[in-house]
Amino acid sequence: MAERTLRGARLGGQSFEDERGIEFAARQQVGYRCKQGHDFEVTMSVEADIPAMWECPRCGAEALSTAGILPEEKVEKPARTHWDMLLERRSEKELEDILKERLELLRGGEIGPAHLHRANKKKRVS
């Protein structure tokens, strides 16, 4: 059995097919330059959308295309605060009314921490 095995072949390494009669896809060289001044080219298909940025193989920084392609500016939404989300559900007038109502209940001892209720009851008794 050992005599029938292929000698010298490694896993995932080589193809034993030759390249005769194969037509390769059309390619282009796209140039990039990083902030460190490293120039390099990347081979891409002619049909590919060329990215404006590519990672530099030397230093890992972002490199811009030398063809003048600019990166798209991302539109960022402003951060929504709790107040913004609250105003989506209620008007300021409604919030003022709710606040007044809750303050009256708190001052009357109907809601709130238990130690506040006990203190109010002692004051009322005396």
Image (spheres, rainbow, N blue to C red):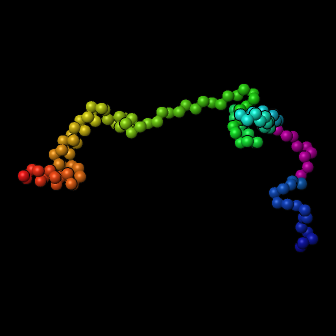
Image-based side of 88 in relation to 126, left or right: right
Report the number of numbered marks. Answer: 0
Image-based side of 13 in relation to 90, left or right: right
**Residue 18, image x and y in percent?**
91, 49
- Quadrant assignment, res 57: top right
Residue 19 part of the magenta-drawn span? yes
Q: Nearer the viewer, residue 122 or 41?
A: 122
**Residue 72, image x and y in percent?**
63, 30
Image-based side of 87 in relation to 55, left or right: left
Residue 41 part of the magenta-drawn span? no
The span picked out in magenta is 17-25
Image-based side of 19 in relation to 65, left or right: right
The structure residue drawn at horizontal position 74% and vertical position 39%, both measured from the top left corner, is: 56
**Residue 120, image x and y in percent?**
14, 50
Q: Nearer the viewer, residue 52 or 10?
A: 52
Dividing the image into 4 quarters, which one contains the N terminus?
bottom right
Q: Nearer the viewer, residue 123 or 10?
A: 123
Q: Nearer the viewer, residue 58 or 43?
A: 58
Q: Is residue 32 visible?
A: no
Taking the view exactly as shown, the residue that stands out farthest to the top is 68
The structure residue drawn at horizontal position 76% and vertical position 33%, both measured from the top left corner, is: 37
Q: Is residue 107 visible?
A: yes
Q: Main secondary structure of the magenta part?
A: loop
